[in-house]
Amino acid sequence: MATKSDAAVKVQPLADRVVVKATEEAEQMRGGLYIPDTAKEKPQQGEIVAVGPGRFEEGARVPMDLKVGDKVLYGKYSGTEVTVDNEQYLILRESDVLAVVG
C-alpha cells in the first residue's frame, strides 16, 4: 500500500521506489570565503516523502521496509533528480538507500 506524507507531494513512486527530499545543509564558510551552491557537495541525507507499494518477486508483492518520514542516507550519485512544483526531489530504489538515521 502506497502512502504519502502530505498533499503537496504530487509524485507517486512505483514498485520499490521512494521519493526523498534532501535535507538542506547550512551555508558553509571556510576561511571567510563564501562557497557557492555549484561547489558544495551534494547532500546524501534526506527524508522520505512518498513510498511505492513494493516490488513483485515470484508472483507476490514484497512490502517496503521504508516508510514516509524516515530519515535516510543514500549514495552520492544515486537516483534521479526531479522538480515538481518548484521543489527538488530524488527518486531512489529501496536498494539505493544505505541506512535509516535515528
Image: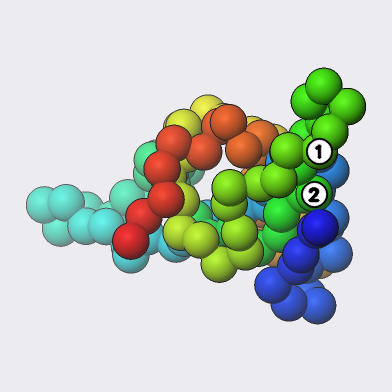
Few, some or many residues within 10 Å of mark 2 (<14, 14–19, 20+): many
Q: Which amino acid does label 2 sit on?
A: Pro
Distance Cα–Cα, label 1 vs label 2: 8 Å
* Contact, mark 1 vs mark 2 (Cβ under 8 Å): yes
User: Residue drawn at (76%, 42%), measured in percent from left and top?
Assistant: 54
Q: Where is residue 78 in the image (x, y as percent from the top left)?
A: 57, 31
Q: What residue type is labelled 1?
A: Arg
Compared to residue 42, the image places residue 23 above or below, namely below
Q: Where's the N terminus, which quadrant?
A: bottom right
Can residue 82 be seen in the rendering of this structure? no
Q: Is residue 27 left or right of residue 18?
A: left
User: Residue drawn at (73%, 77%), measured in percent from left and top?
Assistant: 6
Residue 53, label in figure: 2
User: Residue drawn at (58%, 31%), measured in percent from left and top?
Assistant: 95
Q: Position of residue 15 (x, y in %)?
A: 81, 39
Disc 2 on helix, strand or loop? loop
Judging by the rendered image, the residue that carries numbered circle 1 is 61
Q: In this view, does 25 lie to the left or right of 81?
A: left
Residue 24, label in figure: none
Relative depth, front residue between 68 and 80: 68
Can residue 40 be seen in the rendering of this structure? yes
Q: Where is residue 10, by image quadrant? A: bottom right
Q: Where's the C terminus, which quadrant?
A: bottom left
Q: In this view, does 69 lie to the left or right of 34?
A: right
